Image (cartoon, rainbow, N blue to C red):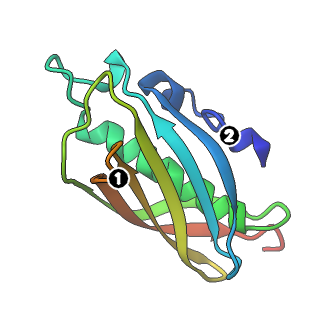
Amino acid sequence: MDRWLGDGGMAIIASVGGSFDAYGVDGEDLGWVNGVFAPLDLACNPHGSVQAGVHSVLLDAAMNFAINAALVGKDRTKATIEMTTELMRPARRGEQYQMRGDVVRLTRQIAYAEASVTNAKGELVSRATGTFLVHRATD
């Protein structure tokens, strides 16, 4: 699973300033992932604020990587079924943020996850919830 560290094989993550640096499974066999986001010019509008779509890309990736951390063998997420993104505060070029993705519930075919971006003060900048289709290698 180390291939999901850094940009996770998705060049857009690094291109906008994101990087995942740790993942694991908690005591309930639910996955999680941590990362950092230091917005680059590509992520921002002319005023230096990060666009909502960039938040969505990073939050979607965080949820996918968290789910994959919980899956065994060749089981993987197959598709994002539904995702809701909320922005509470602006993220700006020149600042650094923490990203976190967590699995909320994992069933045979569906996974539910959430992800967040927080600022240096620990304040919530953006968050997302999502529902994902799971591909089981034995299917």
Please give left or right for residue 72 compared with residue 87 in the image.
right
Relative depth, front residue between 88 and 61: 88
Amino acid type, label 1: Gly
Question: Residue 35 location in percent, x, y?
Answer: 54, 43
Please give left or right for residue 28 compared with residue 39 in the image.
right
Q: Is residue 103 above or below residue 90?
A: below
Question: Residue 121 location in percent, x, y?
Answer: 31, 47
Question: Residue 28 location in percent, x, y?
Answer: 67, 82
Element under disc 1: loop
Q: Residue furthest left?
A: 47
- Residue at 66%, 48% (x, y): give it: 22
- Residue at 70%, 79% (x, y): give it: 27
Q: Residues within 10 Å of mark 1 (few under 14, many from 20)?
A: few
Please give left or right for residue 31 compared with residue 99 in the image.
right
Mark 1–mark 2 contact, CB under 8 Å? Answer: no
- Residue at 56%, 50% (x, y): give it: 34
- Figure quadrant of residue 49: top left
Reading the image, the residue beneath label 2 is: 5
